[in-house]
Image (cartoon, helix red, strand yellow):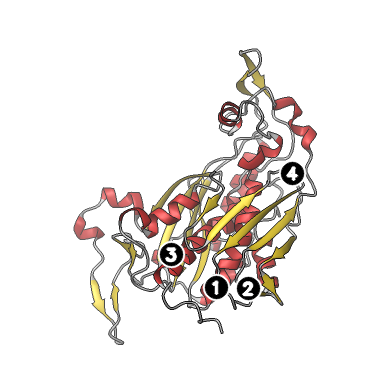
Amino acid sequence: MGNSFGKMLKVTVFGQSHSTAIGTVIDGLPAGIKLDIDKINAFMQRRISKSSFTTKRVETDNFEILSGLVDNITCGTAICAIIKNNDAKSKDYDKIKDNPRPMHADYSAYCKYQGFNDIRGGGQFSGRMTACVCFAGAVAEQFLEHYGIFAVSHISSIGNLYDDKFCDININKDLTERLKNDSFPVINEKIKEEMLDYIKEIHSKGDSVGGAIETVICGVPVGVGEPIFDSVESKISSAMFGIPAIKGIEFGEGFNSSKILGSQYNDEFYADSNGDIKTKTNRHGGILGGISTGMPIIYNVAVKPTPSIAIPQNTVSLKNKTNEILRIEGRHDSCIVPRAVPSVEAIGLLAIADLLLEHRKDNIVNEFE
C-alpha cells in the first residue's frame, strides 16, 4: 500500500475527501517530547481556504488526538489523530462518475480499482488529504526544534510572475515569522499584488493557474542522509509526490545548473571565524552526494494548475465508450499554490526528521528527559 512514508519515523495517512474523517498515524517518535497543541493548530490553519479564488468548501481542520500522548507529552506509542470532514457535498460528483475529469486521477483510479474508487472530492487522491500531512509535519517541526532545525516556505512563482529566491537573501527570524503568518507568503511584497491580480483575472475566466513553492530548512547538521537511494534528495522527493498537485522538484540551483559552467556553478569552501566549514554560495542547496553539508537545504516544487475548471472540456463516457463534453460544477480552487505551502513545508520536515532519527539512532533515546 502506498499510504505510508518513512523508515525511522513512519507516517501513515488514511481516509478519503468525503469520508467521515481523515487521519494520520505517526510511529517512531521518541518518548518525552512535549507538544504544543496551539502550535500544531496554527500550522493546520495555514492550509485553510481564505481567498475568493480558493474553494468555498470550509473545513476547520480541527483534529482529535486519539493516542500517543500523556499530558501532551509523547509516551513512546504511535500518535493517531483524526480530522472530521464536515462540509463535504458529495452530490456535486454524481454527474461526473461516468466522465473522468481531465488531469484528475479519475480514469487511472477507475482502471486500478475496477470502478469501486471513491470519486467524491477525489477520494484518497484529493488535496484534502494534505491536512493529514500538515498535522504530521507540525509534530515533526516540534521534534526538530530540539536540534535548532526549522523550515519556512514561500510562493516562488505564480504563472510567469516570480518572487525573490531564498538563496539570494538572508534568512532571518523576522522574515521567517512574516512568511509563516501570511496567507499568501512572498519575500518581495511588491510582487504579491501582481500575483493576486493575475489569479483573480484567471478566476474570472473560469480557468486556473499553477506556480511553484520554495522551501528552506535551516540548522540540519553535516552528515545527515545516505548515498544513493536514501539521500536527502530522494527522501524529500519520494514523499513530496504524495501531494497530488506536485509535478516537479529541484534542489538548490536545480535545472538552471544545466545551463551554466562549472566555474559559475561550483560553491567554494571556506572556514569561518569559528573554524566551521561552509560554502560561499549555496547553489548545491545544502546537499552533496545525497548528504547534508550544514548549509541550508533548499528545494523548489512545481504545482500544477487545478484541473477542475469551469470551461467545458472533452472527456469520454466510461460506460458507453463515447466522446462527451464535460462541464464541471462544484467548489474548486483557481490556484491551489497558496494552500499547498504548508504541505510542501511539512513534507520536508517529515523527511528530515526521519533522516535525523536514522543519523542519531544510537544516542537519541534520552535526549528529551
Q: How far apart, in angstroms, are the residues tagged by discs 4 and 2?
A: 28 Å
- Residues at marks 2 and 1 touching, judged by CB atoms closer than 8 Å: yes
Q: Amino acid at mark 4?
A: Ser
**Mark 1 surroundings: few (<14), some (14-19) or many (≥20) residues within 10 A:** some
Q: Which residue is mark 1?
A: 30
Q: How far apart, in angstroms, are the residues tagged by discs 2 and 1?
A: 7 Å
Q: Quick one: SS at disc 1? A: loop
Residue drawn at the location 57% of the way across and 47% of the way down: 3
Q: Is residue 90 above or below residue 135?
A: above
Q: Which residue is mark 3?
A: 355
Q: Amino acid at mark 2?
A: Thr
Q: Quick one: SS at disc 2? A: strand
Residue drawn at the location 65% of the way across and 12% of the way down: 320
Q: Amino acid at mark 3?
A: Leu
Lower position in the chain sequence, tag 4 or tag 2: 4
- Mark toward the viewer: 3 or 2: 2
Q: How far apart, in angstroms, are the residues tagged by discs 3 and 2?
A: 19 Å
Judge from the rendering whether residue 257 lies leftward or rightward of residue 164; answer left or right: left
Lower position in the chain sequence, tag 4 or tag 3: 4
Q: Which residue is mark 2?
A: 74
**Mark 2 surroundings: few (<14), some (14-19) or many (≥20) residues within 10 A:** some
